[in-house]
Image: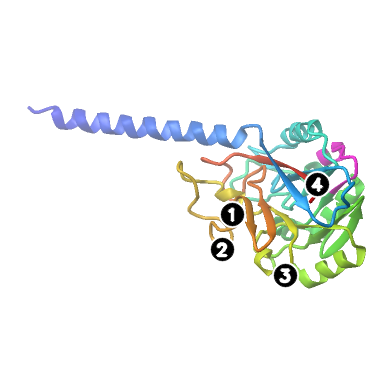
Amino acid sequence: MNRTGPRKLRLALALVALLLAALAAKAWHDTMADPVVHRTTIALSALPADAPPLTIALISDIHVAGPDMPPSRLAAIVEQVNALRPDLVLIAGDLVSDKRPATRHYSTPEAIAPLARLTPTLATVVVPGNHDHWRDIGAIRAELARVGAVVLANEARGFGPLVVGGLDDDYTGHADLPVTLAAMDRLGGAQILLSHSPDPFPDVPRPVLMLAGHTHCGQIGYPWGGSPATMSRYGQRYACGLVREDGKALVTTAGLGTSVLPFRLFTRPEIWLIEVRAR
């Protein structure tokens, strides 16, 4: 009796099981790793020549939910952000998550409470994301105000020599770019546009620094870079990292938590620390 066939089949099955186990371990590591801190410097021509540099910590897509982002993990990430000593903390939406595979959903107060510990020298500024609208944007705005964060939805606010325009969520059709830009112009100063999605970037008609999230850099990526899905109508063009185009600059962060599926693969959570200085 020839036993070579069954042995080869068992070996193949063992190799497949080993590969799946390795991918699962890699996915859990990528999901739960401490956020990678990316640093860049952007020159803003509207900053006064004698203005000192200011630092902005950009985070996004927190998606508080189990198993990967309980409030205790967010509290640890807040301490990591504080250690960077930013002047502004800008949060590009999607604070909550009601994804079906979650092992636990947290209330809005539970999800937002750790943000009260952020200690920027100027302010914490938040724009809504699609998941925030899908849950209860009124309750989320109220809770953010309670912990001292500034919520901007097609609005603008000045912080020192900077003006931050907060664009409401484009994915759910709440963004109004002309209204937001007009609000920024009324205040004057060096302009920064905060948006949940990067997709409004090509429609911005003038040089600006725009900061966004939403894409998760694909969340599940290829080992060689890129990803099969980006949640952007522009595909990979604005899906991840720093892009300079037509005199404008865009930073799209991979965010902190997960959406739809509770794991990452070949992408990592991110904090961007952006130094803005006079040109």
Residue at 50% x, 46% y: name it. Answer: 221
Residue at 89% x, 46% y: name it. Answer: 51
Check if mark 3's residue and mark 2's residue have beta carbons within 8 Å. Answer: no
- According to the picture, the residue beneath numbered tag 4 turns out to be 277
Query: Which of the labelled discs sits on residue 239, or is there none?
Result: 1
Check if mark 2's residue and mark 1's residue have beta carbons within 8 Å. Answer: yes
- What amino acid type is highlighted by mark number 3? Pro
- What amino acid type is highlighted by mark number 4? Arg
Check if mark 4's residue and mark 2's residue have beta carbons within 8 Å. Answer: no
Instruction: Give me the C-alpha separation between circle 2 and circle 1.
Output: 8 Å
**Which residue is nearer to you in this view: 26 or 212?**
212
- What amino acid type is highlighted by mark number 2? Tyr
Residue 176 in sight in this render: no
- According to the picture, the residue beneath numbered tag 3 turns out to be 205
For residue 128, which quarter of the picture?
bottom right
**In which quadrant will I find the N terminus?**
top left
Q: Residue furthest bottom?
A: 178
- According to the picture, the residue beneath numbered tag 2 turns out to be 234
Between discs 4 and 2, the one toward the N terminus: 2
Q: Which of marks 1 and 4 is in front?
A: 4
The answer to if 120 sits in the magenta stretch is yes
For label 1, the crowd category at 10 Å Cα-Cα, with few meaning under 14, some 14 to 19 and many 20 or more, is: many
Between discs 4 and 3, the one toward the N terminus: 3
Image x and y of residue 90, in percent: 79, 48
Image x and y of residue 91, in percent: 77, 49
Instruction: Give me the C-alpha separation between circle 1 and circle 4.
Output: 25 Å
Q: Nearer the viewer, mark 1 or mark 3?
A: 3
- What amino acid type is highlighted by mark number 1? Ala
Image x and y of residue 85, in percent: 83, 34
Q: What's drawn in magenta, residue-wise?
A: 114-124
For residue 202, which quarter of the picture?
bottom right
Instruction: Give me the C-alpha separation between circle 4 and circle 2.
Output: 30 Å
